[in-house]
């Protein structure tokens, strides 16, 4: 399995493409604002064709690239069911300060069709097995995405767990108690690489040993 990444400059979001061994198709993870040019360059260089996109959660910095991505590739979009409402009006699901900052970025926003994903739901796409693990706290519908290719597994943690930190819980829809439960869920996962929504990759064991929030 290969994990490729490109960066969306707005709030420094990691956008990923994941390929199973020996395949030329892939899945995409998250869609930061203006990520489409970087994704197109990456996929062209690697000879990849995307089959689906998974969103770790519904915050604007992870979804606002969808309009351009879906204009380029006709893909099914998968998002935690509890976060689907956030796509209707992305700028208004956060506090007023963020709403004002986001207003210029949502002028061309088209609400995409999405499949609402629930805890434990699994998919077989592009030679990969993808399983969603509910991890609310940062948002109601945040998901950990376990991606498996044969004996190899990686986990996309979105804004639940970062290298050395966790996602904030003080925005609308955040819940500190739910986040603590999600961290307990994370602690039960196998020791595999993790790829967060912001910042560098890490491992489950590294975070359990060094992240001050565990």
Image (cartoon, rainbow, N blue to C red):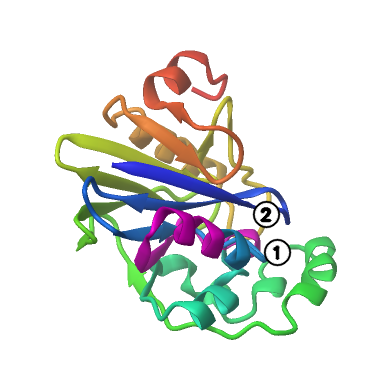
Marks 1 and 2, Cα distance to the nearest angstrom? Answer: 6 Å
Pointer 2: what residue? 171
Q: Are marks 1 and 2 in contact (CB under 8 Å)?
A: yes
- Whether 59 is among the magenta residues is yes
Give the magenta range.
Answer: 39-62
Instruction: Tell me the residue at 47%/22% (across/down).
Output: 207
Image disc number at residue 94:
1
Residue that sits furthest to the top in the current view: 209
Residue 103 has which mark? none
* Quarter of the figure with residue 68: bottom right
Q: In this view, does 58 lie to the left or right of 77?
A: right
Quadrant where the N terminus is found in the figure: top left
Q: In this view, does 194 lie to the left or right of 7?
A: left
Find residue 135 and report its horizontal and vertical position in percent.
Answer: 41, 48
- Residue 169 visible within the image: yes
User: What residue is rendered at 37% in x and 34% in y?
Assistant: 186
Q: In which quarter of the image is residue 91?
A: bottom right
């Amino acid at each position: 399995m290969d994990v490729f990444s490109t960066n969306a400059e707005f709030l420094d979001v990691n956008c990923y493409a994941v390929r199973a061994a020996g395949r030329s198709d892939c899945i995409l993870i998250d869609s930061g604002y203006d990520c489409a040019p970087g994704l197109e360059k990456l996929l062209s260089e690697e000879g990849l064709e995307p089959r689906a996109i998974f969103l770790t959660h519904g915050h604007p910095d992870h979804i606002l690239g969808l309009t351009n991505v879906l204009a380029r590739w006709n893909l099914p979009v998968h998002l935690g069911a509890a976060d689907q409402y956030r796509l209707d009006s992305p700028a208004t699901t956060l506090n007023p300060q963020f709403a004002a900052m986001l207003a210029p970025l949502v002028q061309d926003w088209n609400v995409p069709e999405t499949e609402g994903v629930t805890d434990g739901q699994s998919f077989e796409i592009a030679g990969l097995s993808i399983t969603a693990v509910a991890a609310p706290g940062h948002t109601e519908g945040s998901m950990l995405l376990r991606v498996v290719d044969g004996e190899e597994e990686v986990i996309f943690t979105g804004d639940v767990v970062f290298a050395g930190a966790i996602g904030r819980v003080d925005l609308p829809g955040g819940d500190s108690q739910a986040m603590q439960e999600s961290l307990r869920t994370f602690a039960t996962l196998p020791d595999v690489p993790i790829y967060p929504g912001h910042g560098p990759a890490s491992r489950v064991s590294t975070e359990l040993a060094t992240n001050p929030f565990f």
